[in-house]
Amino acid sequence: MSALGLSSRGFKIGTCIFGNHGAKMGSVKQIVHDGDTVEGRLNDNIGIRFLGIDSAEVSFPLPASTFVSLKNDRWDAFFTSGKWRVGLKLDAGLMQYLESRIGDGHDVAPNHARHADRAQRSLEDIIQDDLDLSGKKPAEFAFFMAFAHEFLDGTGRLLCYLNSADTNFADPEVAKAVTKLSYNERQMASGAAMPYFIWPNIQPFLLGSPFAPANIRPETFWKTVKASSKLKSARKNVAAARAAGLGVFDPQDPLRLEPFELRFISRRKPPTRYVIDLSQPGSNRLLGTQQYYRIPNPEDRLFIPAEYVMIFEHLGWVVEGV
């Protein structure tokens, strides 16, 4: 059992144990701070989902099934048989786009599996390199986490930007160089993962509070985008990875389906997020949930969950392509 998760009624739930007091577990008196605060520790592993990126799925539920490895022949048959279309109600434009990507379905699932393996190996190598450079044992190595607006996703994983803690390295200059880019950014820059910017969980890529009206109104939103060096750098690094043919952009074996596309096809549900085209500064247009493909480069997409669209419309954005 993981420390955090999702209940059958949709609540994010979890378990914890008594917190430490000094080097030992505290007593009741020691862990109770005041009338509404208790010190606790997670008592099991917790998943950490990287913000701002999306890598190919190692496994995912086939329709009416449990999690199945993308290497499994059942996934290959799902695409080659054309069953991926069954029950999937999409606009004609999006369906045509997906059909152009999937074709006869041959090698779609194996292609996804290959890129999932590459992304996993890339992250393993990044962490191992940092661990080796630190000279520490795994039990002594610390991760740094930076959170955005939401702390947990729907399955109870922490949503954050992960990196090596600078305290892992004795030399401050080494620490500065190693931690300049988070693991999230390093995965994007190497082409191991696709960018996947989803508002309001967008800091540190976008500066300031995501809900501040000045950061939403079109005329000032674009000023925030222009001033956000992290976002500019990430988008530039993805464009460079594509130009160099790295990872998901390998011209000999590009990723056929983006991870979120595989997920909504499997779930038999159309995509639910609206999207801003970051390559069109000054625009006040929110593209509809099935229009993302009109923005060819993934680093130019800023996804807006449907529940927040009313805020954007109130502050001057216009939805098109619904």
Image (spheres, grey):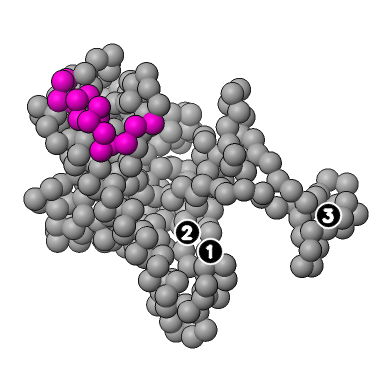
Within the magenta stretch, is there residue 141?
no
Mark 2 and mark 3: Cα distance apart in space = 28 Å
The residue positioned 52% from the left and 35% from the top of the image is: 154
Residue 155 image position (x, y, % from top left): 52, 36
| Disc number lying in front (1 or 3) | 3
Query: Quick one: SS at disc 2?
Result: strand
Q: In the drawing, does residue 24 fall left or right of residue 45?
A: right
Residue 322: quadrant of the picture: top left
The residue positioned 56% from the left and 48% from the top of the image is: 46
Write down the residue under mark 3: 31
Within the magenta stretch, is there residue 74?
yes
| Disc number lying in front (2 or 3) | 3
Neighbour tally class for label 3: few under 14, some 14-19, many 20 plus, Cα within 10 Å: some
Query: Quick one: SS at disc 3?
Result: helix
Can you tell which mark lies on residue 162? 2
Query: What residue span does the magenta drawing correspond to?
Result: 67-82
Residue 96 at least partly seen: yes
Write down the residue under mark 1: 144
Tell whether label 1 touches label 2 (CB within 8 Å). yes
The residue positioned 79% from the left and 59% from the top of the image is: 25
Q: Is residue 204 above or below residue 210?
A: below
Query: Amino acid under label 1?
Result: Phe
25 or 203: which is nearer to us?
25
Query: Amino acid under label 3?
Result: Ile
Considering every residue shown, the one lying at the far right of the view is 29
Neighbour tally class for label 1: few under 14, some 14-19, many 20 plus, Cα within 10 Å: some
Residue 149 image position (x, y, % from top left): 54, 46
67 or 86: which is nearer to us?
67
First along the sequence among labels 1 and 3: 3
